[in-house]
Image (cartoon, rainbow, N blue to C red):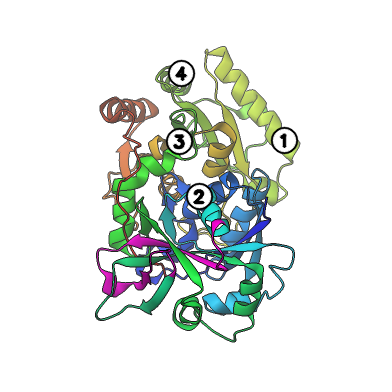
Amino acid sequence: MTRTKALLLAAGEGTRLRPLTEVLPKCLVPLGGRPLLAHWVHTLESAGVREALVNTNAHASLVRDYLALNNTRSTTRLVETHEPRLLGSAGTLAAHPGFADDAEAVLIIYADNLSGIDLTTLLQFHASHSDPFTMLLFRASDPSACGIATLDTDNRIVAFEEKPKQPSSDLANAGLYVVDAAVYRDMATANAFDIGHDLLPRYTGHMRGLPFDGFHLDVGSPQSYRHGQREAGAWAASRFHQDGPGKPAIFLDRDGTLIEDVPYLRDPKAVRLVPDAAKTLQRFRDAGFACVITTNQSGVGRGMMSKADLARVHDAFLSDLAAQGASVDAIYHCPTKPSITDRRTIEDLNRKPGPGMLWQAAMDLGLDVHRSWMIGDMVSDILAGRYAGCAGSVWLRGENSNSEENGLINHTTLGATSLEEAADTILRRHATDGIREASIPSTAQGVQGS
């Protein structure tokens, strides 16, 4: 099989998606309960692509955290290339002229798109013709806003124009290319800034286009991101669960939610379950939810307790639950010592309000985050649920809030005075919603990302 590598162009600032992208990098905004980047990793895995270069700029440390998480579990290894100043799509190639030296072909992917394309099909099409360049195309509803290609009867691109005033067709550049290694090297040494404007016209007559009628969406605008959540959320979630729907979860904070809040708790004898903790967990499990604890434990990072101390506390916690006939599926903790006090700011992807622990649990346990809920007593808990792409969160002792008060994510936040009330609310909504339709959207949407 042809050795193929991938370049994921993921460093876009996502200015149109603010305020969400003031907290998360554009490539990590959630769709279907997983970060956008995870969808491309899944697609690359399915096509047998084992290495991808990912460029970063805004919130680079958070992307770096996600790459580390991915590389412990995925067959596709992600390698970062950091750009303190954005180089442009062609500039990223220029910074890595030798990337294709040990490959026969390179996939170049604008990672701010969500696409239903099977990369195996695209790679097979590329191998079937004699030209060194293949471009994926979709039918645009507004061709004047896209790069537009004209095909001959052999699917050869005989004309290409960026955002034409009078489009010759509706076949738009989907921001996904396959190029032979020699073409990659040629593009990398062309002293260009943008692939679409500066390089694609050079290959007119020497590249083929593959029209794609499936779902393809640029999530770069608020309107398209909302459209993606509304129309493609359930389908996007289903891509990670080949044997049927993934299991929904209840993600729960520990201190102040399931046990009494004792600052930097290290003594297992001080563990006290809150009223109805065991009963509530069992209700959730009986309803088909996994129960997963996600807890910030900066006491470890501060040197105020050891990992062994934390393990003993968790042993006592689990023992108390078991004595009342309850259990949890997993406990995840983040030991990072924060450098700031703002509970709304993500400085480590795995420390709440970062969504990393929830995504890690989803990978480990096969969970459908899109149908899951978060329960906690701090705003950082609620935001972790939102940024992970959960269906909703319940804020103990908090208040109901509009789903768009904290950005663009379609997420319900509800208040409750107790765990029992939180369970009543979630189970009532779950019974009403059921399993959402996960069929793939039928039409291509959106334009190439920027």
Q: Residue furthest bottom?
A: 191
Asked if the residue at tag 4 contacts the one at tag 3, i.e. Cβ–Cβ closer than 8 Å, the answer is no
Q: Which mark is on residue 282?
A: 4
Residue contact at pointers 1 and 3, CB within 8 angstroms = no
Q: Amino acid at mark 1?
A: Asp
Q: Name the one closer to the observer, 100 or 340.
A: 100
Q: CA distance from mark 1 to mark 2?
A: 52 Å
Mark nearer the N terminus (2 vs 3) = 2
The outermost residue toward the front is 153
The mark nearer the N terminus, 3 or 4, is 4
Q: Nearer the viewer, residue 314 or 75?
A: 75
- Work out whether mark 4 precedes mark 2 in sequence or the reverse, and give the earlier one: 2
Check the image and report above or below for 60 versus 86.
above
Residue at left offset 45%, top offset 20%: 285
How crowded pointer 3 is (Cα within 10 Å; few <14, some 14-19, many 20+) is rated as: many
Q: Which residues are magenta?
A: 128-156
Element type at mark 2: helix
Which of label 4 and label 2 is nearer to you?
2
**Residue beneath disc 2:** 121
x and y percent of residue 264 in the render? Answer: 62, 42
Query: Along the polypeptide, which appears first: circle 1 or circle 3?
Result: 1
Rounded to the nearest whole Å, what is the CA distance between mark 1 and mark 4?
27 Å
Q: Is residue 89 magenta?
A: no
Secondary element at image label 4? helix
Residue at image mark 1: 309
Of residues 134 and 326, the one drawn nearer to the viewer in this rendering: 134
Q: Tell me if residue 11 comes above or below residue 50 in the rendering.
A: below
Figure disc tally: 4
Q: Amino acid at mark 4?
A: Gln
